[in-house]
Image (spheres, rainbow, N blue to C red):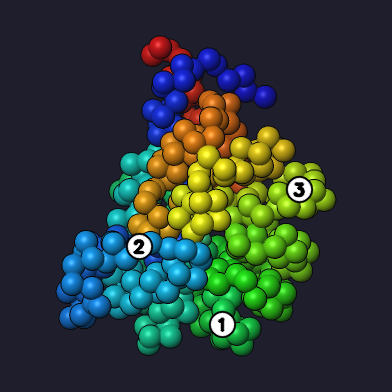
Amino acid sequence: MFKIPPIAPERLPDLLRAIPKAELHIHIEGSLEPELIFSLAQRNGLTLPYPSVEALRSAYAFTNLQSFLDIYYAGASVLLHEQDFYDMARAYLARAAADSVVHTELFFDPQTHTARGVPIETVINGLHRACEDARTLLGISASLILCFLRHLSEEDAFATLEQALPLQDKFIGVGLDSSELGHPPEKFARVFARCRELGLHLVAHAGEEGPPAYIWSALDVLKVARIDHGVQAFKDAALMQRLAQDRVPLTVCPLSNQKLCVFPDLKDHNLRQLLEAGLCATVNSDDPAYFGGYINDNFTQVFAATGMTARHAYQLASNSFEASFASEADKRIWQHKLKESFERFVEYD
Ligand code: ADE
Ligand code: ZN
């Protein structure tokens, strides 16, 4: 185990910003900043129901997940052409690289676009080209995870999978997102079983607003490798034990949880408790354009609110690599870089 060198508390925010990290829970449509929504609307000859960027941004006051999703799906309606998807992902990837992200696994919601008549090839090809360019132009690795919208039917999910399969070399896995309550993981048991046969990685949102039972069924019915959010696990001691024992990663999103009123006050967020209970928790931004911050804002704000230390920072960044679907060789390189970045902070003291 790496011995954490002493780091002055006032240097913690800089350390958090500088350490290499992986982001594993980012909906690419949730990275669309109001400025980009307006410029894509103009490019595509669309009129938005908001008079200005400021008016749109001021509508971002959410009371729960659904109140956010309504506006999030409306924002995504400006995406029509392959170049639009490319530009959106390119902007996010540049922003992630500036936050010392070395690897990211991006969620995308094809049904949000195919329902509007946008071909799935347009979506996947635009996003995939941005991921490829990120490697050469930004030096970071990026891959795609196709998410099924859980408020839609199993039949719709199967149809989406069918459409996506000719492009299977352009995404690494599947996930499950959108309105959680009333749409338990079991609804997609057969879809996930098929994706498993196809060799795709499996993840699912569970325990964001929904009960621990949804986390159990994501694990035991869908057989996912990671739980997105999962913060409601603390209500079930047996589940906490299972998650810790199996090192099941949780992709936690502190600012999202605050803005969607899961933990209205960040000082009450349970990330620290999850980590200290031995869970493989990670920090992520979810929908950074809507929740007031990218990954480093999530790190610095949750650390300030809950009094976490350099030891927690090391564990979270290390967990992000452990939890990723990258190769073992890449993980070793990033873990090494993480240790080096800690040592650099001590030398400059
Ligand atoms: N889609 C985008 N963000 C989401 C979230 N936080 N929960 C569920 N679905 C989402
Ligand atoms: Zn999410």
Where residue 195 sits, quadrant-wise, is bottom right
Residue 244: where, in percent of width, then height? 75, 44
Mark 3 or mark 2, which is nearer to you?
2
Q: Secondary structure at mark 2?
A: loop
> Residue 95 vs residue 104: left or right?
left
Q: Quadrant of residue 190?
A: bottom right
Alpha-carbon span between mark 1 and mark 2: 24 Å
Looking at the image, tell me whether mark 3 or mark 2 is earlier in sequence order.
2
Nearer the camera: disc 1 or disc 2: 2
Q: Which one is earlier in the sequence, the residue at label 1 or at label 2?
A: 2
Residue at 68 percent across and 71 percent down: it is: 185
Q: Quadrant of the C terminus?
A: top left
Q: Who is closer to the viewer here, 155 or 325?
A: 155
Q: Few, some or many C-alpha atoms within 10 Å of disc 3 (few <14, some 14-19, many ≥20)?
A: some
Residue 138, image x, y percentages: 33, 46
Q: Position of residue 234 (x, y in %)?
A: 71, 49
Q: Are marks 3 and 2 in contact (CB under 8 Å)?
A: no
In the image, residue 109 lies at what x, y percent?
47, 72
The amino acid sitting under disc 3 is Met
User: Can residue 329 be spotted in the picture?
Assistant: no
Secondary structure of the residue carrying numbered label 1? loop
**Which residue in the structure is indicated by mark 3?**
240
340 above or below 101?
A: above
Is 44 left, or right, of 113 in this rendering? left
What amino acid does circle 2 point to?
Tyr
* First of labels 1, 3 by sequence position: 1
Residue indicated by mark 1 = 152
Please tell me the numbered disc located at residue 60. Answer: 2
Q: Residue at x 77, y 53 (%)?
A: 236
Viewer-side residue, 260 vs 26:
260
The residue type indicated by label 1 comes to Leu
